[in-house]
Each structure stands twice: as structure tokens, then as C-alpha cells.
Image (cartoon, grey):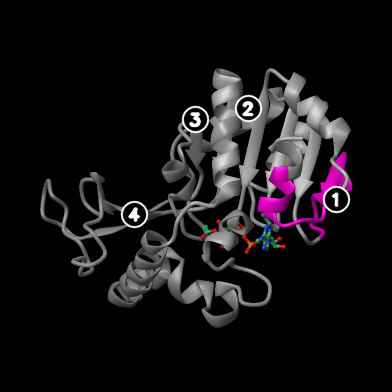
Amino acid sequence: MELPIEARKRISAAKRVAVLTGAGISAASGIPTFRGSGGLWNGFRPEELATPQAYAQNPQKVWEWYAWRYAQVMQANPNRAHRLLAQLERQKRDGFLLVTQNVDGLHARAGSVRMVELHGSIGRARCEVCSTHFPLPDPAVFVPPPQCPACSARARPDVVWFGERLPKGAFERAEAAFSRAEVALVVGTSAQVEPAASLGRVAGWAGAYLIEVNPDRTPLTPHADLHLPLEAVEGLEALLGPP
Ligand code: OAD
């Protein structure tokens, strides 16, 4: 494949880079996406598993689904795409922010630090009474639901469900980075869930060079300066890998 020379130059010259990732970046690690063939939302109904109402009605069922996914992500490993973004962060330092919709923790395990997890983390729980956040035990010994270590009340998954607010300050931090970025890179998201989906458009309107890596077209594609119709590993290798 021919290297995207213009995009590579822009990335290399930029002082401020913002990146948004979605489920597609973890596909090569064996984690299913949500939409599309083989997506989680084909086999499960989001309204029965990923809403506050579903949890109020059947907390055990919701916890069992999250515990299953937690075990799945703990068995997976970060892939080359996660690692290339961690490497880009080390080059750009405080001019870099990675915003992810993923709850799988694979970016952190690949070494990313300057990061906003917009939808929370599947490896953590949050107390329903005192809001203490705490990591889940090893999946091999984890039996849901967990109890808060501070007050012993039941805790819920520390993820954002449909109809809920994002963690405090998370979107503001993401939006600030995208509105100031010289290059914005959007990888492996269907760009259908707001407000995350708006970040790419915000960057484009503010004058950033907007790059999308996704084998399919999305609602963001018409706004992109460059759409690489590739999987995340291939696309990021072309943009960030050795020439
Ligand atoms: P989706 O499942 O909606 O979209 C995944 C995107 O990744 C699609 O556009 C695919 O074309 C693309 N894709 C598939 N394989 C890929 C690969 N190997 N490399 C690159 N791209 C690939 O996932 P998200 O956009 O992340 O929210 O979904 C957003 C939110 O919807 C999730 O965070 C979750 C879900 O409901 C909550 O749970 C709150």
C-alpha cells in the first residue's frame, strides 16, 4: 500500500494531536465490536443490559454480562494499534490526548497515560451508596455483584449506560483537546453515539486535519480530510509506523 505521505507529514509536524478510538481498535485483540456483523448488539439488546432501568430490574443479569465481558478483556492483549498510539503519546507529550469510548482497558495496558475513558472501565466498580470506585478482583475469583470496600453496599459496573452522563469533566477535557488539535485521528468507531461522535466534527470545524481509520464509511467520513478504509492495525501502521 502507498503510504499516506501528507497525513504522515502533518502528524509528524503537529504539536497538538487528539485521538478518538472506538471498539474497532480492539477487534484485532479479539474483543467484539457493538454494531455490524458479529457485534454485541446483534446478539444482546442494549436496553436489557446497558441502561440504569435494566440494572434496577435485574442487577444480577446485568452483572453477569459485565463479568463475562470483563473476563474476556482480561484474557485479551493490546495489539499493535494500541501500542502505536502509546508511542505517539511519548512523542507528543502534553500536546497529546487519547479519548476512548472503550471500556476494555487495553490502551492503558499498552502504555497510554494521557487518556480519557469516556465510557468508564469494565475493570472497575462504583458503590451505589457512597460512590467509591474500586478495581474488580481477578476474573478467576470474581463473583458478582461486588461489595463496596468502604461501606459494604452493593456496587455497580463503573461504566456509562445509555441515558447516563459521562464521568465529570471527561467530555470537557476531550472537547478542549479536539478543538485545539492540529491533527485529529478517529479510529474504529461507527461515530453513532453522542457526544463522542461529535469530537471529530468539532476538530474539523476548528481547522484540524481530520483523519479517519475505519474499513467502513461512517457519518464522520464526509468531514474527514483523509479516510483510510483499513483496519486499525494496518491504518495506524501506515500513518505512524516506520516508512
Ligand atoms: P461500534 O461497534 O458502533 O463501531 C465499531 C466500528 O469499528 C465500526 O464502524 C466498524 O466499521 C469499525 N471496525 C470494525 N473492525 C475494525 C478494525 N479491525 N479496525 C478498525 N475499525 C474497525 O463501536 P463504537 O463506535 O466504539 O457505548 O461504539 C460506541 C459506543 O456504543 C460504545 O462505547 C458503547 C456502544 O453502545 C456504551 O456502552 C455507552
Q: Which residue is identified by label 4?
A: 123
Give the quadrant of ligand 1. bottom right
Identity of the amino acid at label 1? Met
> Which label's residue is closer to the chain start, 3 or 2?
3
Q: Nearer the viewer, mark 1 or mark 4?
A: 1
Residue 114: assigned label? 3
Task: State yes or no: discs 1 and 4 in contact (Cβ < 8 Å).
Answer: no
Q: CA distance from mark 1 to mark 3?
A: 31 Å
Q: CA distance from mark 1 to mark 4?
A: 38 Å
Residue 1: assigned label? 1
> Which label's residue is closer to the chain start, 1 or 2?
1
Residue span colored magenta: 217-237
User: Residue placed at 64% from the left, 56% from the top?
Assistant: 193
Q: Nearer the viewer, mark 3 or mark 2?
A: 3
Residue in the foreground of this view, choosing between 59 and 103: 103
Q: Is residue 138 visible?
A: yes
Is residue 224 on the magenta stretch? yes
Q: CA distance from mark 1 to mark 2?
A: 31 Å
> Which label's residue is closer to the chain start, 3 or 4?
3
> Which label's residue is closer to the chain start, 1 or 4?
1
Residue lying at the far bottom in this picture: please name it.
43
User: Residue placed at 49% from the left, 30% from the top?
Assistant: 114
Residue in the foreground of this view, choosing between 72 and 173: 72
Q: Which residue is identified by label 2?
A: 177
Q: Position of residue 220 (x, y in %)?
A: 80, 49
